[in-house]
Image (cartoon, rainbow, N blue to C red):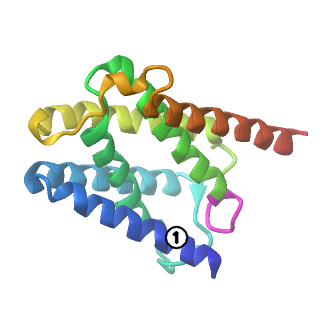
Amino acid sequence: MILKGMVLLLILAGALGCLVIIRTDWKRYGFLYLASAVSANVLCYAFVSSGFYSYPNNVLHGDALIPYGLVSTVFPFLVLSGVRYSPEKWIWKIPFYWAVVHLGVLGEVILRQTSFFVFGPEWDLWDSYTLWWLFYLLFELLGGKIVPDNVRRPINASSFRYGKWAWIVLHIIVISTIFLAGIYVGKTVF
């Protein structure tokens, strides 16, 4: 019951976030949403079909091979948020996406502790971490071509300077997730 509520909450939050961002420019952000949702579902389907991971307890989607609702809302929401709010310069985009990827992998680790999500023998967190980076950076590049600057709201680069709000949030996310990753490795290896 808790797992079902958690997945439903993620789907609703992702859908609401997507709608809020798409409203700013429905053609461009809508296209980016469709591209990211289709890509995420195709990739997820390919990885599940290849046996890299599976969803044995697909709580909201019954016998479906993948959780289409979750994949169609959460991943596109992170893509749309990244394109809309990532800083203008790449020197600040990398730390921004570093935090996004760390939160995504943390979510994956949390879901892995449930019966919802299981890694296959050829898949591990490093594979996921790498693909999260590739997915979001490729969509950042694509989003930069599709969405013009006037409908983006990039975080000001000065916010990433020492002691500013983005610097603090970035460090809290990255340091805490690295710490939790150390605990996870210690728990699973030893």
Outermost residue, right side: 190
In the image, residue 37 sits, relative to residue 85, either above or below, namely: below
Q: Please give the name of the residue rendered at 48% of the width and 28% of the height, measured from the top-left corner.
A: 167
Percent position of residue 90, x then y: 33, 20
Question: Left of 106 or right of it: where is 181?
Answer: right
Q: What amino acid is found at the position of numbered circle 1 in the picture?
A: Val
**5 falls in the magenta region:** no
Mark 1 lies on residue: 7
The answer, for residue 4, to whether it is visible in the render is: yes
Who is closer to the viewer here, 63 or 183? 183
Percent position of residue 127, x then y: 57, 37
Question: Left of 74 or right of it: where is 104?
Answer: right
Question: Left of 121 or right of it: where is 170?
Answer: left
Quarter of the figure that contains the C terminus: top right
Which residues are drawn in magenta? 111-119
- The local crowd at label 1, few if under 14, some if 14 to 19, many if 20 or more residues have their Cα within 10 Å, is some
In the image, residue 137 sits, relative to residue 111, either above or below, namely: above
Q: Please give the name of the residue rendered at 85% of the width and 45% of the height, measured from the top-left corner.
A: 187
Q: Please give the name of the residue rendered at 51% of the width and 33% of the height, measured from the top-left corner.
A: 170
